[in-house]
């Protein structure tokens, strides 16, 4: 059978895309994913239906880990974690549903992607959500499949409320809508949750459309490469549990994520010619930008003793502080939180305060080490290559430390046990510690950059079409020209919604 559209990857963008395309009964859609599929809530593991990213040891069957390098000063490799289950990252993440800032999308537009300005993407953010707190207004929707709510400040967990009160004591402003156009200060975090049920794209989108006769969902299928006739994509070469297979399609859409999609392109012969030739991969199209421009949200953590021994709870993030550093090229570049799930270390319960750089200057790179799909790629984030990034993270740590000394937090936080730096004003030990302990929020993006054909790193045009190939599109976080300020969950769903209009016109 030949499908009208093959979508590779059933995650944050791929499932909404499959929903909108298959709404036309004359269009046959095949949705592929390498993870397991839990079509019934009754059989879905609680890790996927209620868990909020509390660690790889809890939901490891649904994770895929790659060894990566965050910074060359660190000893040994680190891990980045991806969702390996139908629903993708939306099925295993922390449940935070922050949109990117208006400035993010207007920046995308300034790079030649004029269809991605904030004004043009806002209707798609509204379309996908049912916001219980704001309903149907200028910035929010009330008819979409994704249920969005917030834990109000008077109902927060005690330690989270202490963080909120500490922000107020330090005179940070209250933002009443973190998904509105101006999120600065402390805010209640929007989460995709309905009465304790995680609203992943698998639950919110896919489960309501599984009965469509023109939609086929196949799980545990690993796609190796794209099949071509001349420059036209005509299907995919895949591996199923029962063996290898070629699947025919009139259009192929990659939605395998910012690591998965460039790997499939590279194995298909689309990427930097010299690198492909060195691996023995025939070059189909020389696109030097494939795998370049890798971005994320670098993060460091401050750990404190859990003074009142609050229990470890399976709760979504409830509060976040967003600020602008003194050295920022753009506003709202730092975020600070307090994990509501303490960590057990050496018999102690610890709270951690993540300090994240939301708008980084440094960019990394993904490369294949082999044309064998079983071999993991080489992933280098190259965090802190730009000096301004380390200065801003250092400032964020200083603010977090100052915040922890406010009276509301002193009542729940004990001494800081990590980092073991007495003087946070001393640059050299701070810089060394950051380089050795920098981590990631697992918000990978940018490796198949969207841009003008004159951009040497552009891989797709603003409509998602791969340069030099016909009937081949990319719809996921890899097309982002620059990382957005905020978790990628909501923005990736928006990308699936936005792209569906254009792909439907071509199908």
Image: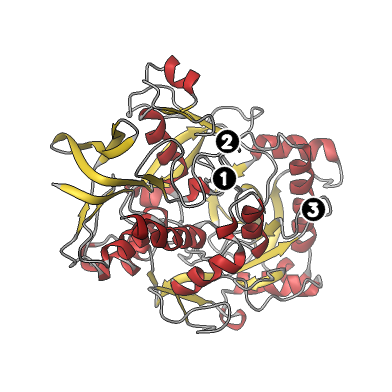
173 or 245, which is in the foreground?
245
Residue 402 located left or right of residue 381: right
| Label 1 packing within 10 angstroms: few (<14), some (14-19), many (20+) | many
Q: Earlier in the sequence, mark 3 or mark 2?
A: 3
Nearest to the eye among marks 3 and 1: give it: 1
Residue 83 located left or right of residue 242: right
Q: Residue at x 15, y 64 (%)?
A: 213
| Label 3 packing within 10 angstroms: few (<14), some (14-19), many (20+) | some
Q: Earlier in the sequence, mark 3 or mark 1?
A: 3
Residue on which disc 1 sits: 451
Mark 3 to mark 2 CA distance (whole Å): 36 Å
- How many numbered discs, if any? 3
Mark 3 to mark 1 CA distance (whole Å): 37 Å
Percent of width and height locating residue 278: 44, 15
Residue on which disc 2 sits: 457
| Quadrant where the image shows the C terminus | bottom left
Percent of width and height locating residue 288: 53, 29
Residue 353 shows up from this direction: no
> Which type of secondary structure does the marked residue at label 3 adopt?
helix
Mark 2 to mark 1 CA distance (whole Å): 8 Å
> Which type of secondary structure does the marked residue at label 1 adopt?
loop
Q: Are marks 2 and 1 in contact (CB under 8 Å)?
A: yes
Residue on which disc 3 sits: 398
Q: Residue at x 62, y 55 (%)?
A: 109
């Amino acid at each position: 059978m030949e499908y009208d559209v093959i979508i590779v990857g059933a995650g944050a963008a791929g499932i909404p895309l499959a929903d909108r395309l298959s709404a036309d009964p004359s269009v046959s859609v095949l949705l592929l994913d390498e993870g397991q599929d839990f079509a019934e809530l009754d059989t879905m593991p609680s890790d996927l239906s209620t868990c909020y990213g509390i660690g790889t040891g809890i939901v490891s069957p649904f994770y895929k880990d790659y060894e990566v390098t965050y910074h060359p000063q660190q000893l040994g490799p680190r891990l980045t974690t991806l969702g390996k289950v139908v629903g993708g990252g939306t099925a295993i993440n922390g449940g935070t549903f922050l949109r990117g800032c208006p400035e993010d999308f207007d920046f995308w537009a300034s790079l030649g992607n004029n269809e991605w300005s904030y004004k043009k993407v806002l209707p798609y953010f509204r379309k996908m959500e049912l916001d219980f707190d704001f309903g149907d207004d200028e910035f929010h929707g009330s008819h979409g499949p994704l249920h969005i709510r917030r834990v109000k400040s008077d109902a927060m967990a005690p330690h989270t409320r202490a963080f909120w009160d500490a922000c107020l004591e330090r005179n940070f402003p209250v933002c009443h809508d973190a998904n509105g156009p101006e999120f600065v200060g402390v805010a209640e975090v929007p989460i995709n949750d309905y009465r304790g049920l995680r609203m992943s794209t698998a639950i919110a989108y896919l489960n309501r459309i599984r009965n469509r006769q023109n939609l086929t969902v196949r799980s545990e299928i690993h796609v190796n490469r794209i099949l071509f006739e001349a420059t036209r994509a005509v299907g995919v070469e895949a591996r199923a549990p029962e063996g290898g297979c070629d699947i025919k399609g009139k259009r192929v859409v990659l939605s395998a994520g910012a690591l998965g999609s460039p790997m499939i392109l590279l194995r298909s012969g689309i990427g930097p010619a010299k690198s492909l030739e060195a691996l023995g991969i025939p070059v189909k199209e020389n696109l030097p930008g494939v795998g370049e421009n890798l971005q994320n949200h670098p993060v460091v953590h401050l750990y404190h003793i859990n003074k009142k021994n609050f229990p470890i709870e399976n709760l979504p993030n409830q509060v976040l502080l967003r600020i602008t550093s003194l050295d920022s090229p753009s506003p709202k570049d730092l975020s600070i939180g307090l994990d509501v799930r303490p960590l057990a270390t050496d018999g102690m319960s610890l709270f951690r305060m993540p300090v994240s750089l939301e708008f980084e200057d440094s960019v990394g790179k993904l490369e294949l080490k082999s044309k064998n799909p079983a071999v993991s790629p080489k992933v280098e984030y190259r965090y802190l290559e730009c000096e301004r990034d380390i200065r801003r993270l250092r400032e964020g740590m200083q603010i977090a430390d100052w915040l922890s000394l406010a009276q509301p937090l002193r009542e729940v936080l004990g001494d800081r046990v990590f980092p073991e730096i007495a003087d946070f004003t001393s640059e050299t030990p701070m810089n060394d510690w950051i380089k050795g302990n920098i981590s990631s929020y697992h918000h990978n993006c940018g490796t198949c950059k969207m841009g003008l054909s004159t951009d040497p790193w552009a891989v797709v045009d603003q409509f998602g079409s791969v340069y030099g190939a016909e009937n081949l599109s990319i719809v996921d976080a890899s097309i982002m020209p620059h990382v957005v300020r905020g978790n990628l969950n909501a923005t990736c769903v928006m990308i699936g919604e936005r792209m569906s209009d254009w792909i439907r016109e071509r199908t």
